[in-house]
Image (cartoon, rainbow, N blue to C red):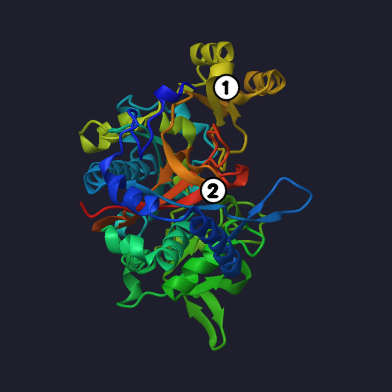
Amino acid sequence: MDKNQIFDEMWGREESLRPPYGLFKEWFDGEEPARLRAKQREAEDLFRLTGITFNVYGRAEAEERLIPFDIVPRIISGLEWQRLSKGIEQRVRAINAFLHDIYHGQEIIKAGRLPERMIAGNDAFLPQMVGVKPPGGVYTHIVGIDLVRTDDNQFYVLEDNARTPSGVSYMLENRETMLQMFPELFARNRVQRVENYPSDLRSSLSACAPSMAGSSPTVAVLTPGIYNSAYFEHAFLADQMGVELVEGHDLRVIDGRVAMRTTEGYKPIDVLYRRVDDDFLDPLNFNPDSALGVPGIMDVYRAGGITIANAPGTGIADDKAIYSYMPDIVEFYTGEKALLENVPTWRCSEPDSLAYVLDNLSDLVVKEVHGSGGYGMLIGPTASKKEIAEFRKKLEAKPNNYIAQPTLALSTVPVFSQKGLSPRHVDLRPFVLVSPDKINITPGGLTRVALKKGSLVVNSSQGGGTKDTWVLED
């Protein structure tokens, strides 16, 4: 990729320092490299001590890894964030309206704006949710919108995470680490706070409780258990919110309510923040072999006896083929043009698009429709001839499973290296909390960074790391 094509968030395109980084650069130039190297090691020790790890699957057994962390913050101006926030809020409102419509009147299909086959043959669509209205009308209580930047004022939505978006614990720990190591930086820069996310999360979830819950709803976090890749986050958020962390075997249905086991007997739960996939949520309604869920919870849910966050069936909204229709979805439900653009997308289920993709595999990024974590994808420009040939066979065998996109010139942000500041590609996952009367967007989010020079893969499972994300007050 031509270096001149790439927008650097610290230096722009003209090697001229951008204003958000002014005070940081002044500080950095006054620091001894040896001290910064020691601080980088200290950050790694802090992460190890805190237990900030994730599990990597695909080997004989899961391998636990430390999340790589870089001490150079990603800095966004207050004005940039205001513009982004408007686009994020518009998109999240549209996603919630879309989910209600898809499980009720399906007006968007009747209007010809979305083909019926995108829903009818989609594994993420849950027939069990048809006609069900969640408490407060909220489907996606927690949303992660993945953004990439290509220029000064050009952001694209890379994908929507409407099922169980992860990574917020890393956002919080990144900030805590930076505050601990570099308090003088925060004294110089007016950085918007992220530390109140756990209390905001609990308040937002409580506001979505069923009407029977009363003034102090009981909230719990449902985890698949210690072997899940995001278990650290599940335990972290439960602890930070001051609520119970439960597994499926801790819960049962009693008198039409979902209750958790306590030392004083079973206590009803009003809101369950679940980090268990739909298929494993209820063995009576979904996968009968699941030991991770709660038998009968869907029956309680349909009767209005519990709030499940996020609602079952929300995966239809972050399906990558549905993503390609998001500009239409936003316009249909809001009456406005989408403020945030999609990345151009070819749906391989369509013959003309498939032919184009097969002819241009070496130039495109190809993704599984239901894929996540950087798995099951092809990055054409960096793939070998053998990898492209193998992926071609997969694509020809099951074209409906894939979409393709151009390889974007993702922006870079400096990382601290042996040579000083070195540019690396980044993306951004802002976190959004939705309640019946409020949408709360945490200023910043999780910046993921490709630590290998030239790499576009930012996922931690694929060798990426994270940075603290600063949104300035002005």
Return the mark for residue 332. Answer: none
Disc 2 target residue: 465
Please name the amino acid that badge 2 sits on. Answer: Gly
Please name the amino acid that badge 1 sits on. Answer: Pro
Question: Regarding mark 2 in the picture, which secondary structure is present there?
Answer: strand
Please state the horizontal and vertical placement of residue 213, each as a whole percent of the image: 35, 74
Q: CA distance from mark 1 to mark 2?
A: 22 Å
Please state the horizontal and vertical placement of residue 427, each as a whole percent of the image: 44, 40
For the residue pair 12 and 396, the one nearer the viewer reads as 12
The answer to whether residue 218 is above or below residue 345 is below
* Circle 1/circle 2 CB separation < 8 Å: no
* Comes first in the chain, label 1 or label 2: 1
> Is 393 situated left or right of 11 in this image?
right
The answer to whether residue 390 is above or below residue 233 is above
Return the mark for residue 381. Answer: 1
The answer to whether one can see residue 139 in this image is: no
For the residue pair 394 and 196, the one nearer the viewer reads as 196
The answer to whether one can see residue 288 in this image is: yes
